[in-house]
Image (cartoon, helix red, strand yellow):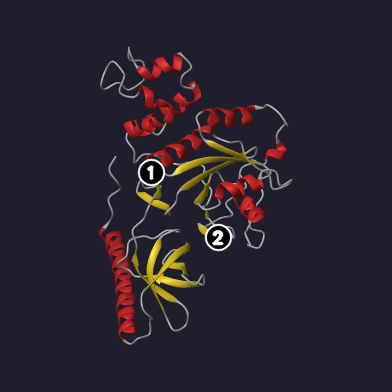
Amino acid sequence: MSGRKLSRQQRWRIDKIQAERNQRAGARDVHDAKLLEAGEYGPEQPGRVIAHFGRTLEVEGEDGVSHRCHLRANLESLVTGDRVSWREASDASGVVVARLPRDSTLERPNAQGQLKPVAANLDRIMIVFAAEPEPHPNLIDRYLVAAETTGITPALVLNKVDLLPSEGGPLRELLTRYQRLGYEVVEASVNDHHGLEALRTALTDHTSVFVGQSGVGKSSLIQALLPNEALKVGALSEESRKGTHTTTTARLYHFPAGGELIDSPGIREFGLGHLDEQAIAEGFIEFHPFLGRCRFRNCRHLSEPGCALLGAVERDEIQASRFDSFRRIVAELDT
């Protein structure tokens, strides 16, 4: 369906607003250039983006001191975790002049389907879920696919285990299924400090990001691991028992023993529309032995005779729940 046609006046207003934005951005660049020529900014130095606030960034210098910097208008979007080159002003603020190459990037499509980075220079994705709000295995699988396709090592964190029975139950069974696939899992609780040392060990000497639904306790875990940090922690909605957004921007934290952690805003959906069916299938690690072994080269793994994946499901070599999750993700590509 084509978009609604804009009137001449509406088009004029849009063009006028965009022109004003470009003019302001150009003025900032001219202002920066004049300040640079006048010696108002110091020499270029490396830094790390530890928080992002639109056109304003919090950049940490090599001395560990944070500076509020603005972004040159000609630079592409930056995210928490980016390494940058920046210049400090005489008032201790600064300007970011370049983004340095990324080792890795976690990305997701936005509401318009455009691929946007979430965090950069990661080597671990910690997928957090909990007894409340009710976890969605398909969302966990989406994060795992995103991790596998970007080469970032994933791990699963089951939080609020104090709310679970001591043995058994559907959540522990879910965790066991992922363990059998070879994924590292950690059980934790901030109420009785269960598993916090194991979680701290898993984060040491890594650059990790916490991802997951709102309300699973990502910020509470960080507060327990780093008690000197002032984090905003929210409660579940009494009516829906779903999480409320308390983290509004991704922020990077340092661990005294080594390692960095980025806390990202919670989300209820994680689209994979930027991947094709083959890439999604490769994101399910237990599919690997069977990919390319179907009778037909263009097999869609629906009901085709000789489908290697369907055969593996029938023999319990692939979990039926994971295969259903794969089908659900692929079905979204068709729509």
| Residue linked to disc 1 | 150
Q: Earlier in the sequence, mark 2 or mark 1?
A: 1
8 vs 81, left or right, is: left
Task: Between residue 250 and residue 252, name the one nearer to us.
Answer: 252
Q: Whole-percent x and y of residue 254? A: 55, 60
Task: Between residue 253 and residue 334, name the one nearer to us.
Answer: 253
Q: Residues within 10 Å of mark 1 (few under 14, many from 20)?
A: some
285 vs 180, left or right, is: left
Residue 249 seen in render: no
Q: At label 1, which amino acid type do we have?
A: Thr
Q: Mark 2 near mark 1, Cβ–Cβ under 8 Å?
A: no
Q: Given the current orientation, which residue lies at the most extreme bottom position?
A: 38
Q: At label 2, which amino acid type do we have?
A: His
Q: Residue at x 55, y 27 (%)?
A: 177
Q: Secondary structure at mark 1?
A: helix
Q: Is residue 15 above or below residue 121?
A: below
Q: Is residue 23 above or below residue 301?
A: below
Q: Whole-percent x and y of residue 182? A: 50, 32
Foreground disc of the pair 2, 1? 2
Q: Residue at x 30, y 46 (%)?
A: 3
| Residue linked to disc 2 | 254
Give the quadrant of residue 169. Answer: top right
Quadrant of the snapshot with the N terminus: top left
Q: Residue at x 45, y 67 (%)?
A: 57
Residue 34 seen in render: yes
Task: Between residue 129 and residue 237, name the one nearer to us.
Answer: 129
Q: Secondary structure at mark 2?
A: strand
Q: Residues within 10 Å of mark 2 (few under 14, many from 20)?
A: some
Q: Whole-percent x and y of residue 101? A: 33, 58
91 vs 293, left or right, is: right
Q: Whole-percent x and y of residue 138? A: 49, 33
> CA–CA distance between discs 2 and 1?
23 Å
